[in-house]
Every structure is written in structure tokens, then in C-alpha cells.
Amino acid sequence: MTAEAIETRGFETEVARLLHLMVHSVYSDKDIFLRELISNASDACDKLRYEALTDASLTADDPGFRVEIAIDRAARTLTISDNGIGMSHDELIANLGTIARSGTSAFVEQLSGDENKDMNLIGRFGVGFYSVFMVAGRVEVVSRRAGEAQAHAWESEGTGTYTLRPAERATRGTTIILHMREGEDEFLDPWRLKRIVKTYSDHIALPVILKAGADEGQTEDETLNAASALWTRPKSDITAEQYTEFYRHVGHAVDEPWATIHWKAEGTIEYTGLLFIPGSRPFDLFDPKRQSRLKLYVRRVFITDDCESLLPGYMRFVRGIVDSADLPLNISREMLQESALTAKIRAGLVKKILSELEKRSADVAAYRTFWDAFGPVLKEGLYEDFERREQILKIARFRSTKSGDDVISLADYVARMRPNQTAIHFITGDAATIASSPQLEAFKARDVEVLLLSDPIDDFWTGAGLDFEGKPFQSVTRGDIDLSLIPEAEDAGEKAAEAPEADIATLIGAAKLALGEAVKDVRVSKRLTDSAVCLVADANDMDMHLARLMRAAKGTGAADAPRILEINPRHPLVKALAIRAAAAASADDLADAAHLLLDQARIIEGEGPQDPIAFARRLSDMMVRAVG
Ligand SMILES: Nc1ncnc2c1ncn2[C@@H]1O[C@H](COP(=O)(O)OP(=O)(O)OP(=O)(O)O)[C@@H](O)[C@H]1O
């Protein structure tokens, strides 16, 4: 080989950081590197099996997919080979020189430089191929892409650079040779490797074979795993550990599944589903693509993990596989999206997941873990899945003015509705502050429970005109509210007297005149009991929090539609102002007071005064008058 044929390339900066961590790793579960390699080998075989559906020549010379492990104790090497799809020259660069997976880039983004902390992240994210450098000082990858004649060898010590050169490989596939570091001899022990494969890779659908010659006792090749697709085995034969390992493989996850759902649908369409609800939020849960990661197989042949129409976006947290007996093997990914069968499978999956969730919601503590992680995503279904709204509402949980640290169901809410209460009241906003919103005062005084909704999606579904058991949802910050038919709470206490109606009318007239277009209306509030003022949206306008979100999303400084300023005729400040208005106080003074009231209401809403300079002037004038 000529020296020119060898290319030396630098790793992408992020990879170099990651490798540094791997090389210096004291991470305790180093054996995960083998799981990653076998998992990659299995994926590579799946990909080729799919390509061979349209080009049988790709696998004609060697149709039996397998992963082989060979130990050479003298040379201190561990070799993992597969006869999967292989990698071309450019694919080697793209996959083993850069951060190819979003999971790994999320990992790198979290790196803090503190090695102890960063080490723990390995367990949380998994780092794929690069984990080999935890145990190997030098790694060679010889790969030949199926359908190509030339193989290429990639080699690195995990420190800054790698080399690429043309190489020989008799058939397609990938061979990974790990030159084990001093002190990592346990991974050259066949018994240790057998245990690792059994633990982590038993579910892999192709045989994982330990080659003869690993030690004196190993005179024949030995298949180490069950080598049948896990989902085809009877449930009673599958242990919880096997399910967990399979979940980690298909879900690229490192945690335990919160729920495992394995069933066979029979009838007009036939398919097997093995679905998992993760135990914690995957890093890409709020990725704008909202893509589902379910893997689709047709009669055990992997087809795609990129089929949008298999699960709705609001169930994108679900991981796992679906194996259909009815779809044609040669279906293209495009045809899949359109297929009526896909739509039927999707309906079946959604139904199954929702009914499982409903069943599991009976265990309040366990369900809370699910809800805290995925409730905000599932609620997207209230907005986009018209048919299943009722079902989703049934399993949705909410914080409320009476829930404390718990969450409640709508059935709980309805069961404790007050006499004559006809609607389900809610407020949307920032989790830290909504519970103390002045608009809630009258509800508290009448002991009416209000749902506290603080996920961004809440602003959308609550505007979709839903009801639960015939009770409409009603925002406490929008439109008119009349609670007069609901009895007051026993501990409501004495109420202060209202200012005379005529005086209030005069004050309102003066305030409207002063505020002009800045408000839609000024009126007496039925919501307030303690605070002087609050803002509400008109019944036909967008609710205030949603308007604020939309404005922030657009990034414009444009003002929202004018709101209604409500004043509390029992509040001492309002009463004093009403007396002054009635006594024909100076129009300027009343105008200043009206602006200050509006700014106060805006501040309570988390917005600044409309004109901060004018606000400061009016406030200091008032204070001068008060102390002067
Ligand atoms: N044995 C292999 N055969 C073919 N391609 C491979 C093989 N091993 C790795 N690759 C390629 O390299 C890419 C990066 O591998 P890596 O293990 O880092 O991440 P991943 O497999 O995508 O994710 P995960 O490890 O979470 O499964 C893979 O997506 C695949 O394209």
C-alpha cells in the first residue's frame, strides 16, 4: 500500500471531546460497549434485509445474517463482525468521524467538563459506537458496503485523528477489531462475554455467535442468544429483563420502561405490537418535528423507523415495534404513509395505548410519574385528535386550586363541583404565579375549584370548545363570569361595603375617558374580592395568556387586543377614588389614577406598564401628594 492511499482525518470537535471522556473513563458499566456494537450490527442487517427486498443480488452470496465474536487472547483483540449493509468510504467518515446521532449530540451538549458528572451522563444517554474507547486503546473498522467491491479500513486510538485506507474484505459487512487496553482482560474471557451477550443482546433477532478457539474449551462456534425476534415469542417466555433490554435497543434508551405493552391483534388486520412507554423523557421529546420512533416490521423484516402515519405526534414518546402480517413486503415508505392498512394499524395502536393508560391510571402514584413526563405531550391530542378527546380528557390530570401537590382528574373535579356550578373553570399561565392571580378571588370566596393550567398546549385545547360530561370549560380570565347562584364558602368572612353605584359609575366614566383606546371597557368586577383591579379578555377575544404566547412566538412588539379593566367596588382605593370622582375631582388627577390602575393590572399579569416613564412620573406624583 502506498502512503498516499492513507488519509488522516481529524474528528469533529464534539467527537474529540466525547472521545477524551471515553478514553479516560472510569464508568463502571463498561460492558455496554458490546451491547452498542451488537445493536449496530443488528441494525445494519435489518437495513440490508430491507434493501434486498428490491435488489436480491445484495444478499445472494451470503443470505444468513449473523454477528460473530472472536477472541484472540495472544493478540489481545476482540473482533465483532457482521454481514449487514456495511459502510462506504464516505459513510465511515459521516458515521464514525462526526456526531451522527442526535442522542449523542444531546449528550455532548450536556457535558460540563467535570468528569465525574459527565461520566454519569454516559449512563443517561448512551454513546453508541464511541463507547468502544472505554475498553480499547486502538480500534480498527473494516467495512464493505453491500453492492460495492472495495472495502475500507478506519482506524483510531481515539485521540484527535483517525485514518482511512482501502482494505480487503471478502464479503459485505463490517468487522470491528478492538485492541484491548491493559486491565481490560475481562472482555477477552469467553464466559464474561457470554454473560454480557445473554444479558444485553438475547432479544436480538439474529444469531450472535462466539467463534471457536476463544479458549481451550471452545472448540466449536456457539450461538449465545435466543436469536428469534423477541416479539414473536410467547409473553410467558419473556422475562422483565429481556423486555427492558429490548426496549433499550429499539428505543435507544438507557432507562427502564414505565410500561410494556405486548399484544397480537387478530381479526380484519393482523399485527403484533410491542410498545414501551419510557420511564423518563427522551431528550428529543419537544423536537419540533414531533416524529414517532416506532419501528415497523413486515413479517419480521424491518421496513422503517420513520413512518409518521403509524402514531400521532401526541404519542411520539412511545417506543417499540409493530410487525404487520398484512402489509406487502415491498411497500415503499411513501406508499406506507398513504396506506389504508397503516391507518387501521394506527387506530389500533392508539386505542391500545389509551386503554392501557386508562387502566394504569388507577395506580395514582405510578400514573403520576407518567403524567409528569408525558402529560404535556398527550394533551396535544385534545387539540388535534377530535375523535379521542373524551378518552384523553378522562386520563388527563391537572393541578387545581384545591389539589395541593397532587394532580386531579376531571371526574374528581366534577364530583366536587359546587351547587349550581355549571362549568369547569380554569386559568392558564405561568406555573409559579397563576395560583395567586386576582381573577381567582371570587372563585375562592365561593369555594369553586379552578384548574391551574401551565403547559403551553393548554392555551390551545382549552380554546377548542370542549366539554367534559356536558360541562363546558370556561376561562376565569375571559368574558363575563357570574357566580352569584353559587353559595358563598362558609369561611368567606365579612365583605366590605361597596362604593355607591352612582359614584362608581362616575369613576368608570372618568377612567374610560382617560384610558381611551388602551382598554376595551372598564367595568365593575364580579371576580375580585380583595384586589383593586384586574384585566380580562372580552368573551370574543383571544384569552390573555394565549395572546401573550403568540406575541412572544412572533417576536413582535405589537400590542394584544385591548382588554377589559375590571375594578373592585369594595376595595378601599377604588372607593376613595369613586368619592373623588363624584366630588368632581380634577380630571388630571383622575386620569393619572386610571392609568396607574391599568398599569397595576398589567403588572399583575406579568406585563410591564404600557409607558414606563409616564408610569414612574404618575407614581411619584401620587406619592408626593400622599406624603406631602
Ligand atoms: N456495524 C455497522 N454496520 C453498518 N453501519 C454501522 C455499524 N456500526 C455503526 N454504523 C453506522 O454508524 C452510525 C453511528 O453509530 P452509533 O452507534 O454511534 O450510533 P447509532 O447506532 O445511530 O445509535 P445507537 O447507538 O443509539 O443505536 C450508525 O447509525 C450506523 O449508520
Image (cartoon, rainbow, N blue to C red):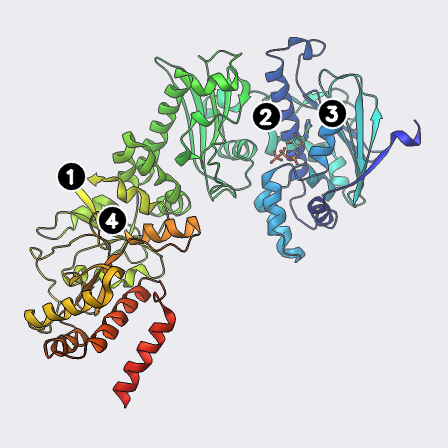
Q: Which mark is residue 470?
A: 1
The residue that label 2 is drawn on is 204
Please provide percent x and percent y for residue 386.
29, 32
Q: State the residue position of label 3.
A: 88
Q: Residue shown at 33%/27% (left/top)?
A: 351
For the residue labelled by badge 3, is the local secondary structure a helix, a strand or a loop? loop
Closer to the chain start, of discs 1 and 3, is 3
Residue closest to the eye, 433 or 210: 433
Name which of mark 1 and mark 4 comes first in the sequence: 1
Q: Nearer the viewer, mark 3 or mark 2?
A: 3
On the image, which quarter does residue 560 sit in? bottom left
| Other-residue count near label 1 (Cα within 10 Å), few / some / many at <14 / 14–19 / ≥20 | few
Asked whether disc 1 touches disc 3, contact meaning CB atoms under 8 Å apart, the reply is: no
Query: What distance separates the C-alpha of mark 3 from that of mark 4?
Result: 58 Å
How many residues crowd around disc 4 within 10 Å: few (fewer than 14), some, or many (20 or more)? some
Label 2 within 8 A of ligand 1 by Cβ: no
SS label for mark 4: loop
Q: What residue type is labelled 3?
A: Ser
